[in-house]
C-alpha cells in the first residue's frame, strides 16, 4: 500500500511516514515490522 522506500529524500516525508506508522499501529494494533523497516530505511536515507 505504501512504497517500500522513501519516494523522496526529504526529512518531512520521514516525519509523515512515522505518523503513518503510529496511525497504522493505533488502528490495527498488530506487529507491523514491514512498516517499521520502511521507516528505518527512510531514516537511513535522511540522517
Image (cartoon, grey):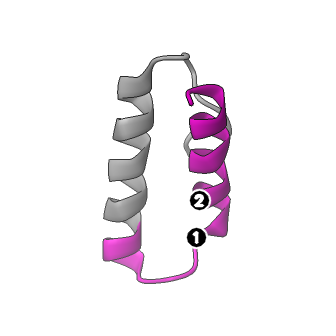
Marks 2 and 1 sit apart, C-alpha to C-alpha, by 6 Å
Label 1: element kind: loop
Q: Residue at x 46, y 18 (%)?
A: 10
| Residue receiving disc 2 | 36
Q: How many neighbours does mark 2 have within 10 angstroms: few (below 14), some (14-19), or many (20 or more)?
A: some
Give the dominant element type of the magenta stretch: helix, strand or loop.
Answer: helix
Q: Residue at x 58, y 28 (%)?
A: 6
**On the picture, is 47 further left or further right than 33?**
left
Disc number placed over residue 17 in the picture, else none: none
Between residues 35 and 27, which one lies in front from this camera angle?
A: 35
- Confirm whether the magenta stretch covers residue 40: yes
7 over 25 or under it: above or below: above
- Magenta segment: 25-47
- Confirm whether the magenta stretch covers residue 44: yes
Residue 22, by quadrant, is: bottom left
- Residue 46 in the image: state x and y as whole percent: 56, 27
Label 2: element kind: helix
- Residue 29 in the image: state x and y as whole percent: 41, 83
25 over 8 or under it: above or below: below
Residue 11, by quadrant, is: top left
Q: Nearer the viewer, mark 2 or mark 1?
A: 2
Q: Residue at x 57, y 21 (%)?
A: 7
- Residue 41 in the image: state x and y as whole percent: 67, 41
- Residue 36 in the image: state x and y as whole percent: 59, 59
Q: Residue at x 56, y 30 (%)?
A: 47
Q: How many numbered marks does the figure carry?
A: 2
13 over 24 or under it: above or below: above
Q: How many neighbours does mark 1 have within 10 angstroms: few (below 14), some (14-19), or many (20 or more)?
A: few
Between residues 10 and 28, which one lies in front from this camera angle?
A: 10
| Residue receiving disc 1 | 32
Q: Are marks 2 and 1 in contact (CB under 8 Å)?
A: yes
Amino acid at each position: 500500500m505504501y512504497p517500500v522506500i522513501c519516494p523522496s529524500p526529504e526529512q518531512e516525508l520521514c516525519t509523515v511516514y512515522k505518523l503513518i506508522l503510529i496511525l497504522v499501529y493505533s488502528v490495527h494494533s498488530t506487529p507491523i515490522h514491514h512498516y517499521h523497516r520502511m521507516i528505518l530505511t527512510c531514516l537511513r536515507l535522511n540522517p
